Amino acid sequence: MSHNPYDSPDVAALYDVLSPWGPGDDFYLDLVMAAPRVLDAGCGTGRLLHRARTRGHTGHLVGLDPARAMLEMARGRTDAVSWVRGDLAAHTWNEEFDLVTMTGHAFQELRADEETGAALRAMRRALAPGGLVAFETRNPAARAWQRWTPAHPHQVTTADGVRVSDVHDAAAPTPEGLVTFTSTTTRSDSSLPLRTVSTLRFVEADHLDLLLERSGLRAVERFGNWDRSPLTASSPEIITLARTR
């Protein structure tokens, strides 16, 4: 397994600061609130399931993530959620969930068809009859990586006044749709920058449908943005809701 940059406590501590709650989180929260039993694969800091609890969700909530540091952040939240370390391939659930989510573009961490298929099959096995799988991946046609350059820094200020700047430097995609980029994060209260290297896979919708079919799933709804608008060539996202075939 390749190095996981989210295993760094420093990266985990800044994740919600650099990626604050947004329309995508609201989209998934609506799905979670409508499902009695939910598995959030790649749950990160646990904020989606935590928010569901604060909104009154009383069902069975499980968060799964391979990064120890991210799960430590999740476990620091005081709510009745089960936090499990690992990935979908390492855990077997059989028809135990009404909803399986993979949010925050975690789907793009699956870098080959074999790995993606294994994850999708695990999602399908975890679904109770009538259950739903929900995830998103960035639309390759929108070429998001072209904006992952030093000319487009992401700058925020934390609640305690610390200024944080995050700068990406992405390489061109490989023929397999893999984009590797370096992230350099600086803080006004530290002279030492934090550098991580990540690789994400960009998948076309047609190929995604093929992988779903091979895994016993089919897309029942497909959107291009969080307002549920149709997928077009200019859409930033490929948002997929799938059920068993």
Image (spheres, helix red, strand yellow):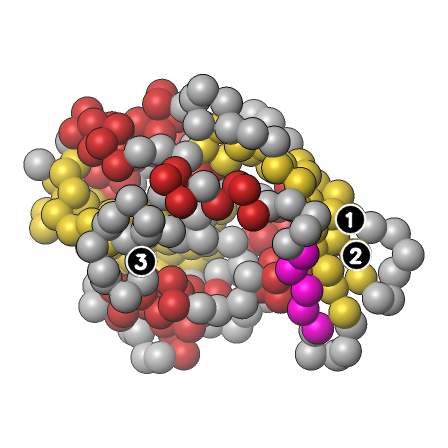
Badge 1 crowding class, 10 Å Cα cut-off, few under 14, some 14 to 19, many 20 or more, is: some
Badge 3 crowding class, 10 Å Cα cut-off, few under 14, some 14 to 19, many 20 or more, is: many
Residue 219 lies within the magenta run: no
The residue under label 1 is which amino acid type?
Leu
Q: Which residue is mark 1?
A: 194
**Pointer 3 and pointer 1: residues touching (CB < 8 Å)?**
no
Question: What percent of the width, then of the height, locates residue 130?
Answer: 10, 50
Q: Which residue is mark 3?
A: 225
Residue 156 lies within the magenta run: yes
- What span is in magenta? 153-157
Question: What percent of the width, then of the height, locates residue 8?
Answer: 69, 46
**Pointer 1 and pointer 2: residues touching (CB < 8 Å)?**
yes
Mark 2 element type: strand
Q: In terms of sequence position, does the residue under pointer 1 or pointer 2 come before the other?
A: 2
The Cα–Cα distance between marks 2 and 3, rounded to whole angstroms, is 30 Å
Mark 3 element type: loop
Majority secondary structure of the magenta segment? strand
